[in-house]
Image: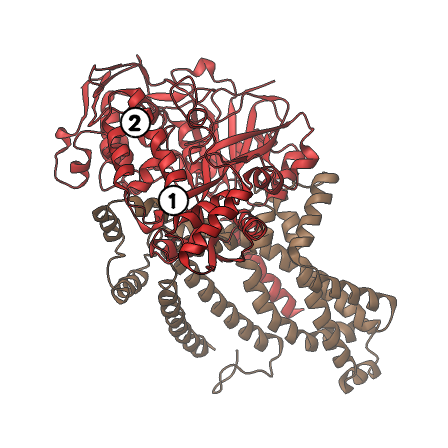
Amino acid sequence: MKKSKLLALILAAAMVITAGGCGFTGSSGGTAASGTEQTASSGAASSDTITVYDTNEIRTMVQWAASDTNSFTILNNVSEGLYRLNAKHEPEPALAQDCKISDDKLTYTFTLRDGLKWSNGTSLTAKDFVFSWLKQMSADATNGYSFIMTDYIVNGEEYLAGKAKAEDVGVKALDDKTFEVKLKQPTPYFIRLTTLPMFFPLNEEFVKSKGDKYGLDAGSMIYCGPYVLTSYDPASGSVMKKNDSYWDAANVKVPNVKVRIIKEQATALNAYKAGELSRVILSSSDVPAMKSSPEFSSNNEFRTTYLQFNLTDKTLSNKNIRTALGYAIDRKTLADAILSDGSAPATGLIPNYMYGNGKETFRELNGDITAFDAAKAKEYWDKGVKELGSVPTLTLLTEDDSVTKTVATYLQSEFKKNLGIDVKIDSKTKKARNQLMDNNNFQMAITAWGADYDDAMTYMDLWTNGTPYRGSYKSDTYNGLIADAKKQTDDEKRLQDMLTAEKLLVVNDAVVSPLFYRGSAYLTKPNVKNLVTHPFGAPIEFKYASLN
Amino acid sequence: MFRYICKRMVYLLITLLIILTTTFFLMKKLPGTPFDSERFSLLPADQQAQLLEKYGLNDPVIVQYGKYILNVAKGDFGTSFFYSGQPVSGVIMGRIGPSALIGIQAILIGLSIGLILGIIAAWRHNSGIDYFTMVIAVLGVSVPNFVAAALLQYYVGLKWGLLPVAFWESWKNSVLPSIALSFSVTAMIARFMRTEMLDVLGQDYIVTAKAKGLNQFKVLMRHAVRNSIIPVVTILGPIVVNLLTGSLAVENIYSIPGIGSLFVDSIKTNDYSTIMGITVFYSAFYIFVMLVVDILYSVIDPRIRLASNGKGD
């Protein structure tokens, strides 16, 4: 019939139009490449591919714009810094073969390995580090991470503000193989910083030749890490293959790796069962059923979720009230029974396993400073109420994702049970919650902070600026301790400053009440070995993995 | 006809401008900035200002609006904040393909099965097949597509291993999501078709056609179906727009890099340029489909005249 023919014609036309653009497996990498990929790497259970996933899109491959863990993960595997974290999360010489630190601990001289090459064949020299570090310290950097260099490097801040010239900044290529960095103050964790994506080298000539197009697809980047990107699509993931020109290529065992994007947990589990994923992260409801599986394991991240009190609030300016709220929370039940996803109960602000003095971790050194004690909670609460003159009403501000809401509901029940009070929950989108906090328009809020680097300073530094987001905490003692720690040349004294500062923040001044350290429980296919997950920065490390 | 289309095109532009303006000012009311607020607030004030300046976010909203409209007129939709540096048009184009493909397939499946079921149900009114069709219709409308998607994924994908569980690698990956999306289309089309056919089958001209000695099939196809299909075409418009512009739930379940999830994410992250880009795309597409539907009316039923003066073509 006439009309159905016409309809068919229109639909067929629409199909032809879209067929060109429906781009299976990453439409960005160009058409030629994606065709061959499909046949080569279907199914993760194959003997040469590891496939993992992330729940968020890969936002960018441009390292001076990247600020999320998923982008970091890809960057860390296709590029490399002077040092790289080993399987035990300790820094190991990578593109640098060694580093000499001057006696005043202010000058670091890195010597690069011989014959380093970018994936396009150009030599990798110390100049590539100077270029990328200056870029990160310039206004071009949009990732909000400039501080991670300008805080330490001589004239970094001045350069960023446009008050110093590039040649005055403390990063110099003495020759092709020697890279010298001058620091403002001794920084015991500086070597650990160089493992982060912001510190990776960039080839000036290549970056400039690509202009605005740099990093937009796999072809507009060059690589110096264990892998090279073969395709990159923010929404469906990226595919990498082993980089044959990598200096340590002999020790990279898995030829192909894939990072997919999966937003639904159930989908990830189905894909894992169907053999399309090498590892799946479990939701808390799946953990009990899977716990006994030999494929089960869990890990802890350097990420503390805590209760931030607003010290300018009429009620919460009372320290006894804050202390009471802190004592009233049974964190063990929260982590083990409510979350039950690999998370660990918080015993302080600084997460488990974070660097202390090399022998013991920071947490071991400072002990458990957030114990649960219902009797003390009630005692402090009554004292606080007496001082205030009436029983206050409290509102807990929280983000509206399911995990945080669960935590908020649990806190509400704990406060009811142990203090006998009804706390209101105000759940908002992340942006809205942040705006309320920035505008000093909250009483207490659940927030979290993930470590940028493996040192307690990544947390402690946050409470020195007295912003409403950090509860408007303004303490000369605390700021004095942090300032002293920053310029201290004696590592032991510095550590003591930090330990005291944590106690001050959590116990004496009760500014925050740490709740839990995020963890994940996951299943890994038995043929995948040594797929390392770092607790901070770029989590997934493919370099040490093997398949058998 | 030509004049009519030209007139509609002018309306299209005016409508678009109104939608753009409303969305732009509403969007600016969203709390926060496109930047990661925790890190952003850690930056010193001058650096914050520098960053806002770079993206023109320091200007008064009305100035930002003016600049944006000018750029759009030049065909420049800006670059995404979330996908740092990627041009919005590229981001959107890359995500339309998958959504459109599963959308079109879902419509083709839904339309063909729906029409056939509807016609047979009306033709064999109150028979077994009629009841069967109605059960399908009720199920199709009341079972949400994400439930169908999850069930299909678990059984067809995982248990029986017939089709890929998820992802977007070859045409095979598009089959399950298309089927999941097609249920509601089938149901809606079948219901509309059945009701309308029942109405038409009772008309005098059907009796006449039968009296003329035309066979059952011809009566059905030439007289009944043609006259019943108008309401179906009407609802086809919104269905096409809905399906081709993506379904968040189904896209997420099958990990399809479609446009549905892009839209939701862009709003969550205050990715202003992407929100606007998708709004323009959605509205232009919707208005365009409505135009096509109107034109289809006159093709199916010549009694419907689009232009008041002159003939429909």
Nearer to the camera, B92 or A397: A397
User: How far is disc 2 from disc 1 in space, using C-alphas?
Assistant: 39 Å
The x and y percentages for residue A392 are 46, 59
Closer to viewer: mark 2 or mark 1: 1
> Which of the chains bears the disc numbered 2?
A
Chain B takes which shade in the image? brown
Q: Which chain is red?
A: A
Q: Residues within 10 Å of mark 2 (few under 14, many from 20)?
A: many
Q: Which residue is located at x 74 percent, y 66 percent?
A: B138
Q: As drawn, is B237 to the left or to the right of B180?
A: left
Q: Is residue A32 above or below residue B49?
A: above
Nearer to the camera, B153 or A515: A515
Q: As drawn, is A442 to the left or to the right of B228?
A: left
Residue A201, label in figure: 2
Q: Amino acid at mark 2?
A: Pro
Q: Which residue is located at x 12 percent, y 39 percent?
A: A163
> Which of the chains bears the disc numbered 1?
A
The x and y percentages for residue A322 are 43, 48
Q: Residues within 10 Å of mark 1 (few under 14, many from 20)?
A: many
Q: Give the quadrant of residue B72.
A: bottom left
Would you say the residues marked 2 and 1 are in contact, meaning their CB atoms lie under 8 Å apart? no
Dot 2 or dot 1: first in sequence order is 2
Nearer to the camera, A249 or A381: A381
Location of the N terminus of chain A by quadrant is bottom right
Which residue is tagged 1? A511
Q: Amino acid at mark 1?
A: Val
Q: Is residue A30 visible?
A: yes
Q: Is residue A23 visible?
A: no
The x and y percentages for residue B189 are 69, 67
Q: Is residue B32 above or below residue A346?
A: below
